[in-house]
Amino acid sequence: MPHHIPHHRAPEPPPTRGGGAGLLLALAISAAGLSLYFGGHWLHRRLFEPPEDTKTVESPINDREWQEMQAALLEASGAYSGNVGIYMKDLHTGRVWEYRADRSFPSASLIKVPIMASVLEKVKEGSLTLDTEIKLTRRGRVGGSGSLKWVRDGTSLSVREIIYKMITESDNTATRMLINYVGMDYLAEKFSRLGLSVTNITQEGMSLSSYRVARENYTTAREMGGLMEKIYNGELVDREASEFMMEVLKHNKSRSRLRRGLPLGWEIGHKTGLLRMACHDVGIVFSPRGDYVLAVLTSEVPDYRSAKNFISKVARLTYRYYKIDAAYAQSRAKNEGAPRSL
């Protein structure tokens, strides 16, 4: 098993409020916190010391449990009335379960993950840095999710801040700023170099229209799950970029979908998407019995609430098998011949 990135929590930047000096102050504080955490000594220590596994998995789920979980996931997936694509991989054992994992789905905001990786490729190439500032203009302002749409024209934001907003708030203005800066052609080329054969990006696909568009952005559960696994293993762009991306993904502000189906004590780095009757969530779940990739994509859903509830149900089904509770501990102690008292 490849060494994975040690998982430490970054300081949570304060929530931003719409408009005015309050938002700008919050952005400045957020930038300072991120700069401190993702820069200097911390990254040097993480990058140049030998990697180490900080997580020992003493009890990965066994074959019987894996089979039971597969059966439960298959039943739930088949019962949902929308289109479903799921890719799950246990990153400790290497086991994979998939359900129509190669089916194409409108990517919605999942497109922001390969956009983030592509921008960090530019950082690796040296043509910009995380501290490079981009000025917000009227042309770059987009509605929908995110708080940057309320920021005054002419405000300069660092690439670090913009990426953070794009992922944690799914900020559409942040996304447009990065697309305008690096160019659509550059992103399309980098998507291919990232190993994405289905995941694409088009101008029409970036539209926030709730109706069908002529040239949609598409992706699959397998490709999005693969990106998450590469981030986890420090292989997407490079280790430094992967560490940055993982920490940003861990600060996703969404509390629905996968997050809602997992206990509050579990860490998850993930990205959601919702547009044109497609609803998704994809990420890495850090559990007591092993970390795992979970990508759940849906389309042509009856309504967004049912899709979100379905994704939460998938997460709960995995939680049922990856948790450690008193009953599990007693069973394990009995099997090992140890006293049953806890």
Image (spheres, rainbow, N blue to C red):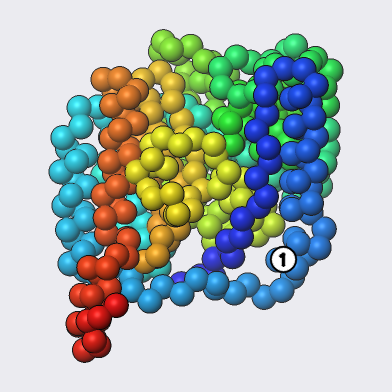
Query: Percent x, y for residue 276?
Result: 40, 18
- 207 relative to 158, above or below: above
Residue drawn at the location 74% of the way across and 46% of the way down:
34
Q: Quadrant of residue 292?
A: bottom left
List the residue tagged with mark 1: 47
The residue positioned 53% from the left and 33% from the top of the image is: 111
Q: Position of residue 122 (x, y in %)?
A: 74, 43
Q: Is residue 281 above or below residue 243?
A: above
Q: Nearer the viewer, residue 52 or 268?
A: 268
For numbered disc 1, what is the local secondary structure? helix
- The percent coordinates of residue 288 (x first, y second) are 40, 65
Q: Residue at x 21, y 64 (%)?
A: 65
The amino acid beneath tag 1 is Leu
Is residue 284 in sight in this rendering?
no
Q: In the rendered view, tell whether residue 333 sits above or below residue 162.
A: below
Q: Residue furthest front?
A: 341
Q: Quadrant of residue 202?
A: top right
The residue under the point 61% across, 50% down is 247
Q: Quadrant of the C terminus?
A: bottom left
Lateral position of residue 285 relative to residue 247, left or right: left
Say whether residue 142 is left or right of residue 282.
Answer: right
> Can I make out residue 80 in this image?
yes
- Nearer to the camera, 65 or 198: 65
Q: Nearer the viewer, residue 327 or 190?
A: 327
For residue 63, which quarter of the picture? bottom left
